[in-house]
Amino acid sequence: MKNSTLFFCRNKRLQIVVCIIGLLLIVNRGNTQAAVEKFINNSIFASAHIGLAVYEPATDKYIYSYQSQKNFIPASNLKIFTCYAAIKNLEDSLTGLFYTQEDSNFVVQFSGDPTLLHADFKQHPVIDFFTKNKFITVIKANWDNKYYGNGWAWDDFEADYMPELSTIPIYGNTVQFLKDENRVIVIPRWFKDSLTFYGNTQNGKYNIERNIHSNQFKLVNSDQKFFQKNIPFITSDVLAIELLQDTIFKPIDYTDADVIGNVEWHKLKSQPTDTVLKYMMQRSDNFYAEQLLLMIGNEKFKETKPNKIINSLLQNTFNGLPQKIRWEDGSGLSRYNLVTPEDIVWVLTKMKNDIGAERVNTIFPTGNQGTLKGMFKNYTENIFAKTGSLSNNFSLSGYIKTKSNKDLVFSILINNHQASTNEIKNAVEQFLINLIEKE
């Protein structure tokens, strides 16, 4: 009888413990729901459209969703798609160029690699190739693309975040102007004679602008101090070859012939793909994103038209997306892009499953890093996410590890807000910190 009583008591205690745990889970989930309601009802979102999805892979359930199947402009969250496409379709290192050889003669086609003479990299295997080989002929690549993406803002032509797309990108397709006391340094130097002075550099208050129709730049007086500026230049294959010649101090043969018969092409590798993806994701580099999308098409699908590349990716790499998306470019600059929070969560989940958390965490920015600078300062091990912003639009999507060791995947897309970007960021940050702390 004593043993039976003890067994009964133990079971009663177990029941009580189970009930307490269940109540705590209900209360905790209630707190989470309340936090979500507080977030979406914030007065700063009065004019905004909000989509939100928080997914728990371990249970294969959305622990919260709000308008998660509706379409939103993702801004640079679209780079999450480009990043996954590059991981799945490009090799470990980017192809700097294609070449074929007969005796000591080389015929070369460029690949669209955006890293050539880019300031991010100190070593350039393509430059080494041109320097050490005497007889090289560059032939026109089979590209016939627009310089800008569909739906880009034309009046951003001077903005450093919108370089033109090109077959032979070089120096990031931008001219860098640097202040050196009362002088202006121009990189690449080929453009130094294209700068006309209409202002005074003595007091340091000036600005540099570009003519919309040409690579002519002018220095004009301003009420702001000048430090440095990167301005995209109008690209062409011929100009790229001239810039390359001016850099290596060596003539290069170029022909616009694009057919040389059936030859065996070899690949010259340039930079590690993950290194380029890290730059793309952590500082939200539009130029890298656009050129990588074109490289994927060129190497994987033998296609260089962005719309055809994207259609091929949707039929292959992204077959299985929860909702139909509209995908226009690689960077998210286009306001024509439309995706749902659930689409982004699907891609993020696939990415992590395919390459693992360690590699994902290397590519994505964490707290107080990259475009998350100033955010999540005390949560550098708890969040890895990609921001996105266009005027009146903000997005943040990525991965969370909560204090209770839960792994979550989330996407927050906000369109048409009229608050300041800092106000929007603060509200999103506080909501996600609440998830980290209490979920």
Image (cartoon, grey):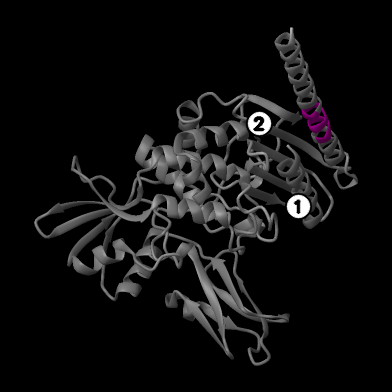
The image position of residue 230, as x and y in percent, is 56, 69
Q: Residue 329 versus residue 388: which sits nearer the camera? A: 388
The majority secondary structure of the magenta stretch comes to: helix
Residue 180 as seen in the image, left or right of residue 120: right
The residue labelled by disc 2 is: 55
* Residue farthest toward the front in the current orientation of the protein: 2
Q: Residue 63 versus residue 9: which sits nearer the camera? A: 9
Q: Quadrant of the C terminus?
A: top right
- Tag on residue 36? none
The image position of residue 243, as x and y in percent, is 38, 69
Say which of marks 2 and 1 sits in front.
2
Residue 151 visible somewhere in the drawing: no
Residue 183 in magenta stretch: no
Q: Amino acid at mark 2?
A: Tyr
Instruction: Give above or below for 118 relative to 190.
Output: above
* Residue farthest toward the top in the current orientation of the protein: 1
Q: Which residues are magenta?
A: 24-31
Q: Amino acid at mark 1?
A: Lys
Q: Residue at x 48, y 26 (%)?
A: 315
Mark 1 crowdedness (10 Å alpha carbons): few <14, some 14-19, many ≥20: some
Q: Quadrant of the N terminus?
A: top right
* Marks 2/1: CA–CA distance: 21 Å
The image position of residue 361, as x and y in percent, is 53, 48
**Disc with the residue nearer the chain's start (2 vs 1):** 2
Label 2–label 1 contact, CB within 8 A:
no
Q: Residue 209 versus residue 62: which sits nearer the camera? A: 62
- Tag on residue 425? 1
